[in-house]
Image: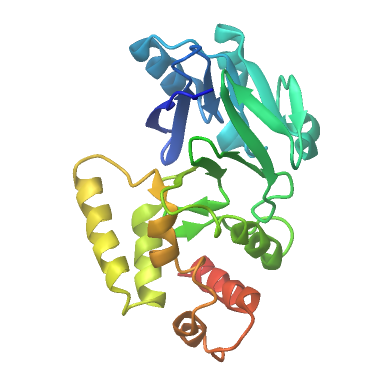
Amino acid sequence: MTVSRPEIRTFLCRSDNIGVLIRDPATGACAAIDVPEAAPVLKVLDETGWTLTDILVTHRHLDHIEGIPEVKRRTGARVTAPRKAGADVPDVDVAVAEGDLVRVGELEAQVWETPGHCNDHVSYWFSGARIVFAGDTLFTLGCGRVVEGRPESLWRSLERFLPLPDDTEVFSGHDYVLSNARFALAADPDNVALKSRMAEAQDAKAAGRFLVPTTMRHERATNPFLRSTEPSLAKAVNLSANSPAELVFTALRAWKNSF
């Protein structure tokens, strides 16, 4: 069976959250990835005429779930959320954990537990479409802040993305692209691909767009956190070239926190 290419809409929520709708054109099933606030989601549904059937929650933080009650009340959408979030996510119908499968019509995603930003965080990997919804784990040119746990946990989560195909589209939960790009250039100033990516980000911002989604090809080439195995990044944080990647990542993350 050939699965149709999903239709996707991205839009701004709150001040810098990225709202996403993914729709299976074969069945009409449609999912929101998180609901940072209700109004923008409902507006895009009205503009497209799509019927929301599902809400896929990446983690329990308020800026990703605040709009769920209203959107569920208005649409009847089924809410799927991380089991580890417990009762912190409202109106949950299905609780998921590592290795579970979720379906949006004929589209199928594997649930990855990707802790580090917070303990309950999950990502949704739609392998057939080569799309991953990374929430606040992996950003364009950056990664999430470690709120719970240790940096090593977030590094292990980021490592899961590294083997994904070059053309995998990565949808993140926030538009932090320009601030991430400025830090990336400070850490990796000789990276020609990164300089080009910064120019793209500036052009996108000027045009009222954002570089979400990104691709794994771009991120492997330009994201300093994913490049923690590179000697140049170890040098940037005053570590030896053969330092373990998790130590380099930890130092980079600490630098970014105060950048």
Which of the two residues, 194 or 14, is positioned nearer the viewer here? 194
Residue 123's spot in the image, x, y percent?
A: 62, 42
Residue 5's spot in the image, x, y percent?
A: 42, 27
Q: Is 64 situated above or below 112? A: above
Where on the picture, by quarter, is residue 197? bottom left
Quick check: 174 left or right of 79?
A: left
The mark total stands at 0
Where on the picture, by quarter, is residue 84? top right
Q: In which quadrant of the rendered image does the C terminus lie?
A: bottom left
Quick check: 96 left or right of 171?
A: right
Q: Residue furthest front?
A: 1
Which of the two residues, 78 or 125, is positioned nearer the viewer here? 125
Instruction: Please give the name of the residue rendered at 24% of the width and 55% of the height, measured from the top-left corner.
Output: 200
- Residue 141 appears in view: no
Residue 80's spot in the image, x, y percent?
A: 68, 26
Instruction: Please give the name of the residue rendered at 79% of the width and 29% of the height, measured from the top-left corner.
Output: 87
Q: Is 134 situated above or below 70? A: below
Q: In which quadrant of the rendered image does the N terminus lie?
A: top right
Q: How is the image coloured?
A: rainbow
- Residue 117 appears in view: yes
Where on the picture, by quarter, is residue 88? top right
Which of the two residues, 214 or 11, is positioned nearer the viewer here? 214
Instruction: Please give the name of the residue rendered at 49% of the width and 41% of the height, measured from the top-left corner.
Output: 130
Instruction: Please give the name of the residue rendered at 69% of the width and 67% of the height, measured from the top-left corner.
Output: 152
Q: Is 119 situated above or below 62? A: below
Quick check: 58 left or right of 169?
A: right
